[in-house]
Image (cartoon, helix red, strand yellow):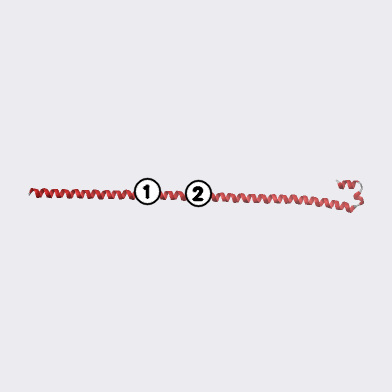
């Protein structure tokens, strides 16, 4: 606007250097504005790239955490199964030991009863003589 006013009064015709300087200044101002727009776009692009990279890192971290949780759950399940197996084995061993002990006691009682019967038989034979 100032250049038009200056030109309208015949100023540009009287001072061509001032007119050239004014055009150069306006051109430089346009170039600075264009450069600022380009810089803003570059900054926005870099921010977007950084956001995408952060999102990818976050996704990878979430995936890794989920895998670790799954591994922990698997290990816990395996430990529970191992404990249950060991408890079952201990119960089987205890039942087997009890059965063996009962069989030994039954055999001892049977042997004792047979010996008692044999003694009574011998005593009856001695008494019968």
> Disc 1 and disc 2: Cα gap in Å?
27 Å
Q: Secondary structure at mark 2?
A: helix
The image shows residue 43 at horizontal and vertical percentages of 70, 51
Q: Residues within 10 Å of mark 1 (few under 14, many from 20)?
A: few
The image shows residue 88 at horizontal and vertical percentages of 37, 48
Say whether disc 1 or disc 2 marks the residue closer to the N-terminus.
2
Residue at 54% over, 50% down: 65
Nearer to the camera, 100 or 59: 100
Name the image quarter holding the N terminus.
top right
Nearer to the camera, 56 or 104: 104
Q: Which residue is mark 1?
A: 88
- Count of number-bearing discs: 2
In the shown orientation, is residue 114 left or right of residue 25?
Answer: left
Which residue lies most toward the bottom here? 17
The image shows residue 32 at horizontal and vertical percentages of 78, 51
Q: Which mark is residue 44?
A: none
The image shows residue 54 at horizontal and vertical percentages of 62, 50
In the shown orientation, is residue 15 left or right of residue 69?
Answer: right
In the shown orientation, is residue 39 left or right of residue 108?
Answer: right
Q: Secondary structure at mark 1?
A: helix
Q: Residues within 10 Å of mark 2 (few under 14, many from 20)?
A: few
In the shown orientation, is residue 108 left or right of residue 29?
Answer: left
Q: Which mark is residue 70?
A: 2
Residue at 92% over, 51% down: 14
Find out whether the residues at labels 1 and 2 contact each other: C-beta distance under 8 Å: no
Residue at 77% over, 50% down: 34
């Amino acid at each position: 606007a100032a250049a038009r006013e200056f030109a309208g009064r015949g100023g540009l015709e009287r001072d061509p250097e001032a007119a050239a300087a004014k055009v150069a200044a306006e051109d430089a101002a346009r170039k600075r504005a264009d450069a600022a727009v380009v810089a803003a776009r570059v900054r926005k692009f870099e921010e977007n790239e950084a956001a995408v990279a952060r999102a990818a890192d976050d996704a990878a971290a979430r995936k890794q955490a989920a895998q670790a949780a799954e591994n922990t759950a698997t290990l816990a399940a395996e430990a529970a199964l191992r404990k249950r197996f060991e408890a079952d084995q201990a119960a089987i061993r205890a039942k087997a030991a009890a059965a063996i002990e009962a069989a030994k006691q039954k055999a001892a009682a049977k042997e004792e009863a047979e010996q008692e019967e044999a003694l009574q038989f011998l005593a009856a034979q001695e008494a019968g003589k």
